[in-house]
Each structure stands twice: as structure tokens, then as C-alpha cells.
Image (cartoon, grey):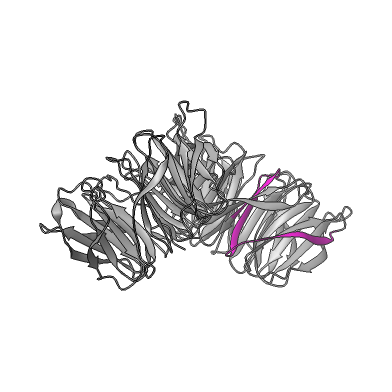
Amino acid sequence: RVYLVISFFRMEKEPPSRGQILAGPGGSVYAVAWCHSLKLLATGGDDKTVKIWRKGKQGRYQLKHSLHGHEDYITSLAFDEVTGDIASGSCDHTIRIWSSSASECEPPAMSQVLEEYASDVSTLGFHSTSGYLVSVALNDCLNVWKRNSVGEFQIAKSFGSPSLRFFCFGLHQASGTICLGTSDKKVLVLTPIDSGELELSQSLSEHTGAVNCIAFNYESEECTMATGSDDNTVIVWKQGVDASFACMQVLSAHASVYSVIYNANHVVCGCSDNSIKVWGHEGGSAPHLQSTIQAHSGSVFKLQAIDDGMLISASDDQTVRIWAASEVETYRCDEVLQGHAGFVLCVDCDNSGDTLVSGDDEGKMLVWRVGDDGQYRIVQSLERHSSDVLCVTVDTLSGRMVSSSCDKDVVLWGIGEDCLYEELQVLGGHTDRVTCATFGREGTMLASGSRDSTVKLWGKTEKGAFELSQTLCVDSEVTCISFLADSNMLIVCTEKGSVFSSCLQEESGLYNITNTNVAPCGCITSISLLDNECFATGSSKNIVSLWKCSQDGTLVIWQELHHNCSPTSVFSDKTQTIAVGLGSGEIWYWSKQEDGNYSVRNKVKAHLDHVSRLAGFGRSVVSASWDTTVGVWDNLA
């Protein structure tokens, strides 16, 4: 099902940039609405709840009220700009009117339920001049509602036919012209809303698919509109002196168009391919494609304009994003760090989060530090490696760092007098790319894993240098390694899906592989500790497995967390939350429940490409991505 919202907005000449994400929609979002007079945002979806948001002091939207009453998905929302009332339409076949409260602290109260329809309510809109409420249901008619003497809505006029299925309507506020989009590929133009009975004045048949959305350009002196369709196009129309509409231009969106916005400078549409497409037509020029934004990981069902050039998008990926025309605002993303020219393959940070280190596929590592203004800045560029930097790990105790690369080297770094990293030692010996390296035993041991199917253990000598103490052989390329908290156990994961536990032998001081468990979920891509005896691994078959390791090295999977694509990185704050980075660019957050199992709490479209690595400090997460950026995310939420 596709449900539409009719809106307009003013945007600067630049296309919208990356988005703020609102927490709490609670499922797929089908409806958004903005009240210019009260500066309120409303969202609704498959959680059957209308959520009201207000902009806070920090410029971020905060959830103020949740309105309950509908018994099925919420499909449409509209604000009355004069009274502040909200109308909500639903798959329960009702329209509910919520009367605004005199106090911001009091939620709007449900004042009326309109039950005239026998099918899903697809679109709602208020006519600002007359106060009429206009509604359309999928298998029913268009109704125009007018308030009676006691303020309740009653049907004043209707338009419909048993053979027509209405998907959307557009209402031109100045003229009162109503246009309807239908399932049989037509746009129907009706007589103005203030006239007598609603009658058909024109039928536009240029579309070759169902018409899903209609938007008028209110900033034009002429009456112009844009319509979007399942035929993968947006058509721009102009009304002539005889009041009839003519096709001006057909814009190819390369995907079904579910929502459209039209203003003096831009045509913007939300599509089934998860994108937002922006055409510019400044100065009366013909629209030309300016930007294609991979906005969501699901279809973009709704676009809505709000003040200050901001744009809202809603999707069935369960997120609502707020986009700025010229600057990045992300509700959870504190900062996006840009400086790499290639894919960012790895990232790590110190305990405080004051220092981050990231590595890319060009062999470069960047060191970032927090300045006096609280923002990260590049303080050092390290170009020691000659190929992809696959791993960087910062020792939380000493601040030293180890890096590994496709050039087969493991490099140990220390902090000099100027607080910058300097190379201390190169640990050679691997015969193929070194995929991972980590510290153990309070920084006195290093472990490195390689495509040569070995793990090398390096011990710290009395002089402070590291030397090879042991080599463990496994069944295939080592993809990730981790010491359990007390370092008496080393976990090794491989490309074949094997998980090895190696126990430290007290007499010899060497590690001995005591248990092997082949996970039924493909190549192990990442590992993160949950506590002293439990850890999580991500796999190529869309599963994160939660393991428990006993003192003798026995490994048992006690829960599997399923995702919609391959987990590429796993990070746990070792308390109640697991963050999982995905190949789609999303980060999924899982919370520990009272029964000890984890359930998904939130899904965030964090990057425009593959999330290659997650790290963290305190309650924050740092993400590295193939989109060449590093993200800093607050509150694991």
C-alpha cells in the first residue's frame, strides 16, 4: 500500500544534505505532517500511534506526545493551520480529529471519530481558507467535511465512482482546485472546492501507471503541479487560461514515485529504490536532475517540508529523517569526519574518546583529536603502510597502537613527547595480508591474525620490545581475534566459520587450542566481547551469534540475532547494548531484556555504504564506512 502527503517547501539552491533521525517511530512510517503555525511535526505508521514532535533548544526534535486510539496502521496526517487540530487517517477506516490543547504540556485530545469509509483512508488535507477537511479512501470516494455549529465535522460534498480507486489528491489552496490520482493511471481535475457540487472538469491520462502523489507549486504565480506514478516518472503540469492542465515535462525517476514536492526552484520525489531525487528549475528553466540521494534502506513513502529549508522523509525502514539544504544535522550522529579519499576500513579510539584513529584502502591512517570546541580534527596523517590498512587497535591502558595491513606488516606505535604517534617496531613474519591485531595481558602481549591461516603471539621483553613467542595454525584465513577479559583465553575466528578457543597453559605460558566450533552461519566477519566469558560474532549469513565460553574452552551459542544483510562489524559496550554494522550502511542496536536475551531496539541508516568497522568509548559508538567517512554516534541509541 502507498499513502501520500501533499506539501510544499522552500529549499536553498543546494540539494538536501544528510539527515537527522528521529527516535521512536516504532515501525514503518507512512505519514508525516508539519504545522507551520505551531512548529509541530506529526508522524504515524504501523504502530497505530500518532507521535507529536517539537524542536528543542539544541535544534533537535524531541518526542512530546503519543496519541493512541487507532486500531490499525496510520496512513495519513494533516494539521489545521488555523486551529492547530490534527486529523489522522488509518487502515481501520476511520478519521480521528485531535483538538489542540492550550498548554504545550497537555497532549491533543481526541474530539471526533469519522466513520463514513469502508476502506483505508489514504490522504487528508485542510483547506486553509474555508476550514474544510478533504479526505480520500482507497476504495471509496473523496469527501469534503465542514464543521457544524458545535464544531463537529459533517460531510458537505462528495465525489466518487464505483469503478475508480483513488490513491491521492492535491488541493490548491488559492483556487480551491482539487486533483485526484487514480489506480487507472489518470489525474482527475475537479471543480473548485468552494463551488457547488464537485464535478469532473478534466481527465489527464499521460501517466502509464497508477498515480501515487500530487503536489502544487504554491510559489508560482501560475497554477502548476507535479504528479508521481508507478510508471517511474514525475510529470510537471501547467494550467492554462481556459483552466485546463497541459503536460509541460516528463521527468524520469527510474523507480516508482511515492511522494513529490514542488516549489519555485526544485522538484523533489521519494522513490521505491530508497532514494530522494532532486531536480532544479531555477529562473523558470526546464527541470534538470541535480542530485540522487540514497536516503533510506527502504522505500521513501513520504516527503514533507518544514521551516528553514528543511525536508522530512519517512520510510518503511522505520526511520524518519530531517534534511537540511546546506548542513548536516543528525539526531544521533554527533559528527561526521571527512578526510579520507578512499574506503575507511577500520577505526578505533582511546577510552575517553578524545583520540580516534582510522585507516583506509590507500594505506593511510588519520589521527583525530577533540579540540577546544568539542569537534574532531585531523592532527596527524600516518602513511607507513603501502597497502590497505585492515586493522587499527588502541591499547586502552598505555595509549599505544598497533596497525596491520595487506602489506603483511604489523606496526607498533607509541606516543611521543608531542602527543603524536611515532613508529616503535615492525613485527614481520606473516606471509600474507594481516587482517587483525589486538593487545592482551594488560598490553604485554600482541596477537595478529593473517590470511596465511596463522595467529602469531608476540610477548613484551624486559627492554620493552615485542618478539614472537608462538604461532597457532588454523583452518583458513583469520578474520578476527580477541582476548577474553582476563587474557587467559584467546578466541580466533576464520573465513570458514570456525571459532577456536585457545587456553593459556600456566606451566608453559603458551596458548593451546582446546576447542573448535564450526558455526553454521558462514564466514565470521567480526567479534566483540560482551563480558568476561561471553562474546558476539557477526557472519556472512546475516546472523550475529552470541557465545559463552567456559573455563575449559567449551563454546556454546546461546542466541542468534538475525539481520536483513551481512553484519560487517559488531561492538558491545559490555553492559546492555550490542551495535551491529551492516553492509547496507545501517547500524542495528540490540538491547538486553530481563530474560537475558537480546531484542532489536533501533535501526539507523548511518552511512551511504558498507559499515566496515565499529568501535566505542563510554556510551558512544564510532563507525567507519566505505563512503569515506567516520561517524561518531552518541548514547548507543
Query: Magenta segment, which residues?
Result: 553-580
User: Is 626 situated left or right of 157 in this image?
Assistant: right
Question: Which residue appears at 47% of the width and 28% of the height?
Answer: 104
User: Is 633 situated left or right of 9 in this image?
Assistant: right
Residue 50: x, y in percent?
51, 44
* The C terminus - image quarter: top right
Vertical placement of residue 219 versus 252, above or below: above
Residue 268: x, y in percent?
31, 55
Question: Which residue appears at 61% of the width and 62% of the height?
Answer: 563
Residue 460: x, y in percent?
72, 48
Tell me if residue 566 is in the magenta stretch.
yes
Q: Main secondary structure of the magenta part?
A: strand
Q: Furthest residue to the top?
A: 103
Quick one: 605 or 489, which is closer to the camera?
A: 605
Tell me if residue 427 is in the magenta stretch.
no
Quick one: 332 or 382, which is closer to the camera?
A: 332
User: Is 541 situated left or right of 113 in this image?
Assistant: right
User: Is residue 289 visible in this depiction of the protein?
Assistant: no
Vertical placement of residue 543 versus 222, above or below: below
Residue 433 location, quadrant: bottom right
Quick one: 201 or 208, which is closer to the camera?
A: 201
Vertical placement of residue 619 versus 214, above or below: above
